[in-house]
Amino acid sequence: MIPTKRRVQVAVISDLHLGMRGCRAEEVLHYLRSIDPEILVLNGDIVDIWQFNKRYFPPAHMSVVREILSMVAQNKRIYYITGNHDELFRRFVGFQTGSFELVNKLVLELDGKRAWLFHGDVFDVTMQYSKWLAKLGGKGYDLLIWINYLVNELSKSLGRGPISLSKKVKESVKGAVKFINHFEATAAEIAAENGYDYVVCGHIHQPADRMIMTADGTRVRYLNSGDWVENCTALEYADGQWRIHTHELDAVTVEDPVLTKRDEELFRELLVEFSLSR
């Protein structure tokens, strides 16, 4: 028997980093199979083209792609918002096929309120002025995730719990960046100036849901979907409410979607093209 899926009006996930060793692809797959969204927003850094190596794209990562393609085949409304790790997709912004659309930003009307969704790298000073440094940091972060995996395997064999080296290091570095460029405050200020009630970001791998008071006294709800490397979080909108969902691996199991061989061949060809064009 196939478990009943949770119905949500909008689901937002970001920072999957498919193609990176730290990606929690099994958790992503279980989450996608646990929900029945009217709208699914992929808010950037879904495929990690910075770290992409055609020799490393495991079956679990491909299963996530297949699940998304299956949702497209079911005519689920899906928006893919480009991020910095998948910025090569920006050359195809405006592409649309069926219920799938590739965009840089998105505005949704939700029960009389306006939500502004974008990845968030536009506010990152390391991306604006030192992209080479950001990419170098991405390589180091990938290595740290791999070291963290080995450490946790050893910890598990000793009967101990997981140790999140990567999360502690990331929070320290990203916290410094956020302090410098005031990421959340800047997003809220611009959202207020444009009359948005919600601003929804990814990028900094920090799930969040809080009200921000702007300089002119306007209140804007800032939301961040977190990531699927360390936090395994998503944003969900249902019954007029936003919530942060933290996913557990034992949620749902269903059979793999049935797709044509050509679907997978096309995706693999795109990945190879992107890897060659970097």
Image (tube, grey):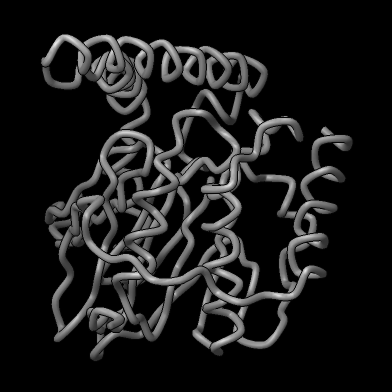
Name the spot of residue 136 as percent of width and height, x first. Answer: 61, 14
State left or right for residue 130 relative to residue 261: left
Residue at 14 percent across and 62 percent down: it is 219
* Residue 153: quarter of image: top left
76 up-or-down from 246: above or below: below
250 or 267: nearer the eye? 250
268 up-or-down from 180: above or below: below
Residue at 60 percent across and 53 percent down: it is 62
Quadrant for the N terminus, please.
bottom left
* Residue 184: quarter of image: top left
State left or right for residue 74 relative to residue 146: right
117 up-or-down from 123: above or below: below
Residue extending farthest to the front is 1
Residue at 30 percent across and 34 percent down: it is 230
State left or right for residue 90 relative to residue 30: right
Residue at 50 percent across and 85 percent down: it is 76
Name the spot of residue 187 as percent of width and height, x first. Answer: 35, 50
Name the spot of residue 259 as percent of width and height, x first. Answer: 67, 75
196 or 278: nearer the eye? 278
Name the spot of residue 61 as percent of width and height, x first. Answer: 55, 48
Quadrant for the C terminus, please.
top right
Q: How many marks?
A: 0
